[in-house]
Image: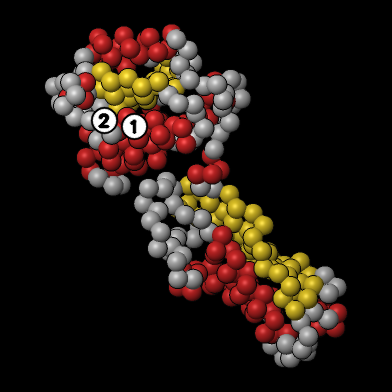
Amino acid sequence: MKSVSNKVETLRTAVAVGTLEASPEAIRRLLDNDLPKKDVLIVARVAGVQAVKKTSELIPYCHPVPIDHAQVDYEVGERTITVRVTVSTIAKTGVEMEALTSASVSTLTIYDMLKPVDKNMVISSIRLVEKTGGRSSYIEKFPRDLRAAVVVCSDSTAKGVRSDRSGRIIRDRLVEHGLAEPTYRILPDETDRIELELKGLVSSGHRLIVTTGGTGLGPRDVTVEATRRVIDREVPGIMEAARAHGQRRTPYSMLSRGLAGLSGSCIILNLPGSLRGTEESLDAVFPAVLHAYKMMAGGGH
C-alpha cells in the first residue's frame, strides 16, 4: 500500500451515489413492502453501513481507517431508486472508496431483493459526488508576490564543513506551494548575526522566513533566542502542530524548541536542523500555515 505516514490527520468526508432503474410496479411493491424479501431499504441500509467497515478487506490497496460516521439515505422516484452514502473519518487518508463501496453494496442489495419481481433492472451509475478534507482542502490563496526566505543556522555549514540539505528541502517545498524562489542565507550559530539577518529580511519586505537549525538544547543552539528578539507576537499553535506531528514518529520531537511568530506582517518559523525533522515539520504546517495571510488581511477563518 502507498505510505501515508507523512500525512496529517484531518476531518475527511466523502459522498457517493448509486442509481438503480426499475419498473414502476417493482418500486410500488417496494414501498408497500409487498415483496418476497421484506424491508428492502432497511436491509440495504444495514448492508451499506457494513460495506463501509469492510472496504479495506474488499479493495486490496485501501488503508483501514476508523469510521466516525456512515449514513445511507434514499430517494425513491417513479422509476429510480437513488442511494446516497455519506462517510466521515478523522484520518490520514480519505474515505471515498468506503463511500463508493457502500453505494455499490446498498444498490446491489436492493437489486437482489427486487429481482424476483423485476428481471430488467439496471444499475445505471455508481459515482463519487463530493470529497472534502486532506491537504488539498487547505491550499490557500495568498499574495503571489509574497517574498520568502530560507535561513540555515549552522556553524559547520557556514564554514563549508557540511553541505546544507534541510535548507534546500525547505526552499523546494516553498516553490512547490506556489511561492517564488526564496532568498537563501547560511549563517553561523551566533545570536546577534541571526537577529540582524532576520530583521534585515523583514525590513526588505519578506513576508515569510523559515529557519532551519539551532532549535535544540546544544550550547550553540540560539536560533530561537534570536527569533524571540525579532517577533512582535508568538503564534504557538504552529510549532505545537509540528511537534505533535513529529512526536508520533519519534519521541525526540519534544526536544525541539522551535518558535513561530509575527514580525509585523512577516511570519517567522523555526524548523529543526535535521533533514527528517525539517520534512516532518513542513508536512505538519504547510500549506495550512499560509491561511495566516488571509487572516492578517482581515479575512478571518
**Where does the image place residue 181, in percent across and percent down from the top left?**
45, 26
Label 2 sits on residue: 164
The three-letter code of the residue at mark 1 reads Arg
**Where does the image place residue 300, in percent across and percent down from the top left?**
59, 26
Give the SS element for disc 2: loop
Q: Nearer the viewer, residue 71 or 32?
A: 71
Tell me the quadrant of the picture where the N terminus can be found. Answer: bottom left
The residue lying at 78 percent from left, 76 percent from top is 21
Label 1 sits on residue: 168
The residue lying at 74 percent from left, 91 percent from top is 116
Within-10-Å neighbours for mark 2: few <14, some 14–19, many 20+: some
Instruction: Judge from the rendering whether residue 47 lies leftward or rightward of residue 2; answer left or right.
Output: right
Q: Are marks 2 and 1 in contact (CB under 8 Å)?
A: yes
Against 183, residue 26 (above or below) is: below
Residue 149 in sight: yes
Instruction: Judge from the rendering whether residue 19 lies leftward or rightward of residue 202; answer left or right.
Output: right
The residue lying at 37 percent from left, 10 percent from top is 199
Which numbered disc covers residue 226? none
The residue lying at 47 percent from left, 12 percent from top is 205
Quadrant hosting residue 170: top left
Quadrant hosting residue 233: top left
Residue 224 in sight: no
Cα distance between the residues tagged 2 and 1 = 7 Å
Against 36, residue 86 (above or below) is: above
The three-letter code of the residue at mark 2 reads Asp
**Where does the image place residue 137, in percent across and percent down from the top left?**
56, 43
Within-10-Å neighbours for mark 1: few <14, some 14–19, many 20+: some
Tell me the quadrant of the picture where the C terminus can be found. Answer: top right
Instruction: Judge from the rendering whether residue 127 lies leftward or rightward of residue 79; answer left or right.
Output: left
